[in-house]
Amino acid sequence: MIYRMHFSDMARARAFGIVVDDETLTWASDPAGHDLTEPITGYFSRGGPVGSGKQFEVFPGGRARLTK
């Protein structure tokens, strides 16, 4: 499944979406072309009812990890 989160980096004056694929544990930016400078952990929604999302840690370069 695909999960989404909005990411804002105020220090660098940029914002973009992060889309995680929980089957491949990879992520991509929306729009494409953005990367992270350090890992972040956040709650990602799949657009369903409240509580239907998952928490992931996403790493620079496109790798993701499901957290508890």
Image (cartoon, helix red, strand yellow):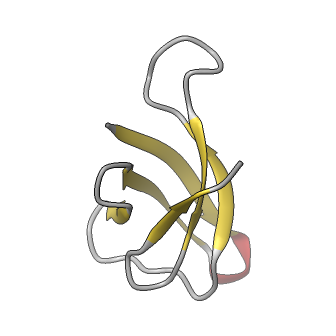
In the picture, the quarter occupied by the N terminus is top left
Nearer to me, 43 or 6: 43
Nearer to me, 14 or 40: 40
- Please state the total of marks drawn on the protein image: 0
Left/right of residue 40 with respect to residue 18 in the rendered view: right
Residue 33 % position (x, y)? 29, 77
Q: Quadrant of residue 58?
A: bottom right
Q: Residue at x 53, y 78 (%)?
A: 59
Q: Is residue 45 above or below residue 37?
A: above
Q: Is residue 26 above or below residue 33?
A: above
Q: Residue at x 63, y 62 (%)?
A: 8
Left/right of residue 60 with respect to residue 13 in the rendered view: left
Residue 56 % position (x, y)? 59, 55
Question: Which residue appears farthest toward the top when viewing the image?
Answer: 49
Left/right of residue 52 with respect to residue 21 in the rendered view: right
Nearer to me, 38 or 53: 53
Q: Residue at x 44, y 30 (%)?
A: 46
Q: Residue at x 54, y 49 (%)?
A: 6
Left/right of residue 5 with respect to residue 55 in the rendered view: left
